[in-house]
Amino acid sequence: MKVDEGAGRASTRQRQTKVRALDDHARQELKRKRLDALEQDNWHEDALEPDDDDYEPNESDDGELFLGEQKKGRKKSAGKGAKKKTRGGDQFREETGRTKSFDDIVDDEQYHKFPSWVPTYLSAAVKPSTRPPRKFCYLTGLAGKYKCPVTGDYLGSLEAYETHKETRLKGMV
Amino acid sequence: MAQAAGTIVVLDNGGHTCKAGFAGQVDPKRIVPNLIAKSKAERKTFVGDQFDACTDFSGLQYRLALEKGYPINWETEAEVWTRIFGKDVLAVNTADCRLMLSTPPLCPSSILATINEIVFEHFNFQSLCSACPQLLASYAQQAELEARSEPQPAATLVVDCGFSSTHIVPIFDAQAINFGIRRLAVGGKVLTNHLKQVISHRQWNVMDETHMINDVKEQMCYVSLDLAADLRAAAVRRGSAITREFVMPDYIHVTRGYVKPVVVDVDADASADASADAAGDRGGCSGAADGAGASVGAAGGARTPGPPAKKARPPDGSAVRGGGGGSAAGGVSARGGEAQQVLALGVERFGTGEVLFYPSDIGLDEAGIPEAIVQAVGATLPDLHEALYSNIVLTGGTAKLPNLAARLEAELRQLVPADFALNVRPAADPIVAAWRGASHFASGPLFERSSVSRDEYLEHGHAFVKRVCHN
Ligand SMILES: Nc1ncnc2c1ncn2[C@@H]1O[C@H](COP(=O)(O)OP(=O)(O)OP(=O)(O)O)[C@@H](O)[C@H]1O
Ligand SMILES: [Mg+2]
């Protein structure tokens, strides 16, 4: 497939070429991180306070401003403005402990102390499958015919294994 | 703003979107993204409905109001709701309104308490009635059957495959059987993020382009009905019948990505024509447009399927595999030659949906939807089992994946006793099913009785609300 990296903003997309070589522990760690990543949104809290002046928060109070219109007589002020727009936001943060993650909230409920027959968020989680996990090639998504003796990854073809050797296995063998 | 007192506002507050409207209406007035997004490119922050005006989705930052399907980010949620009740969406004065709100099943009581505070003390609603969206979706089915004067089923098993997760909720006698509720961690969010990782691993780094990959998923993914055959087909080295190309938006010339029509024969010259495709294509991808667009090159636009409001784009085929590309249409083709970034999807088209059936594919230690259904039904009284299996309603946006219902029914057939009837019915419109049920319920006779007034809440507190609303 042809690649031209020069196209507009989209050029921040880069071909993936390097993959870290991983030992067993690191692999577990990566898997865990990957699962976590499937749940995350990507907001960075500090991003709320832009330090450059031309960043323009979009006022939402009262639904009066839309898309960069400026409210009459209201100065755009970096940082402050962005913060203030969360009308009542700080109040909610304090009242509700917004900084708490959902997992923390569930922990606080102490569901493990409930009798086993009481249905809770935790008890509703689906139990593991009775079937063995399937084995798919992580590079191609095809049936994993080979298992890498070093990393335990499944691979669908010798070609994929070559790629695997050049990437994940690099520096390990 | 001049609303009659007691107007009933109906919200289905999902992790992806909040469906907002008025009781008694057929459809929500507006479907509002339940998030605040910040665009570096446009230097703007979008709250809820404002996001619809966003045009550059590169490098967006999101903050969602819900985590794992439960509203916890109240800073965000209150802003989104403020927009919803404000003049651009519902234009109501909340103190003059009653609220019908969906809350997720088995919701931790501290979250329910916060909901009460926000609804009664921040927005000053007159009253609140809440129920889980799955129960509400079953009301929608009831209403449909009622309208066609067909008999009501004895029981319903709602499978809500939405954004945050997949919930399976057995329903009997218009109530959720709470000890039978089961939840998979896999929903549309996990599917999109998984696809993002897979593509980033194999082709382009798209980790920051959740919005585009979600579009890829919705336009290109489907559920395989014959996995072995599809895997074989996808393994073909070149131009497999399954592979499709997605032209990625650059947000300058192309504002929304689209699926390239299939080219029959790469070597043959001018007649680069879209073909009907073998691979069970997404509705609206090729099929429909093909017949009309069979005319010659100039009609490039007619052939391109799918999303509206796209700028003129290069005549198809010219850019597919380099080969000369001496396509007629002058001005445009120059742009065509210019760096079109293309994403090829083969096995990913059906591999993504596999995660719903085998969460273990991505390392999750839980059973897939078919087995989860068996677990949920198994937790109910044996007398109910057949009734539940014979009326499974599939709802939530992810249920729009083509073939999902058919595959589910096929896999369930292996697990359910052979003498049991089995029916998997997709909701008429899976995204708004819960809202429709809520709208119907809120305009019916039971609504009043299931609501808690502001005064009652102030006098009796959270436990009272819980007793009335969450049976
Ligand atoms: N055509 C489609 N194909 C595949 N997935 C789709 C399609 N249309 C919508 N979706 C997915 O459906 C999900 C949104 O569904 P829905 O509106 O039911 O979720 P929600 O109610 O907001 O969230 P929750 O799961 O918290 O209830 C998104 O992940 C979206 O990508
Ligand atoms: Mg929902």
Image (cartoon, coloured by chain):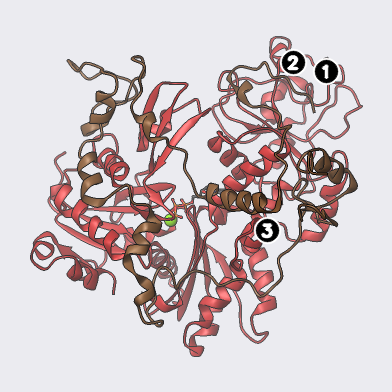
How far apart marks 3 and 2 lie (CA) works out to 39 Å
Tag 2 and tag 1 share a subunit: yes
Q: Nearer the viewer, residue B402 or B151?
A: B402
Picture colour for chain B? red
Q: Which mark is residue B325?
A: 1
Residue A88: give x, y in percent of width and height: 20, 40
Mark 1 within 8 Å of ligand 1, using the beta carbon? no
Mark 3 or 2, closer to the camera: 3
How far apart marks 1 and 3 lie (CA) works out to 41 Å
Amino acid marked by disc 3: Asp
Residue A133: give x, y in percent of width and height: 71, 66
Residue placed at 14% from the left, 56% from the top?
B126
Which one is earlier in the sequence, the residue at label 2 or at label 1?
1
Which one is earlier in the sequence, the residue at label 1 or at label 3?
1
Neighbour class for label 2 at 10 Å: few (<14), some, many (≥20)?
Answer: few
> Which quadrant holds residue B51?
top left
Q: Chain of mark 1?
A: B
On the question of residue B7 being in view, the answer is no
Q: Which residue is mark 2?
A: B337
Amino acid marked by disc 1: Gly
Vertical position of residue B128 compared to residue B217: above or below: below
Vertical position of residue B230 compared to residue B39: above or below: below
Residue B281: give x, y in percent of width and height: 71, 47
On the question of residue A104 being in view, the answer is yes
Neighbour class for label 3 at 10 Å: few (<14), some, many (≥20)?
Answer: some
Tag 3 and tag 2 share a subunit: yes
Q: Say if mark 2 contacts mark 1, CB within 8 Å.
A: yes
Q: Which residue is mark 3?
A: B361
Residue placed at 42% from the left, 55% from the top?
B69
Helix, strand or loop at mark 3: helix
Q: Which chain's colour is brown?
A: A
Quarter containing the N terminus of chain B: top left
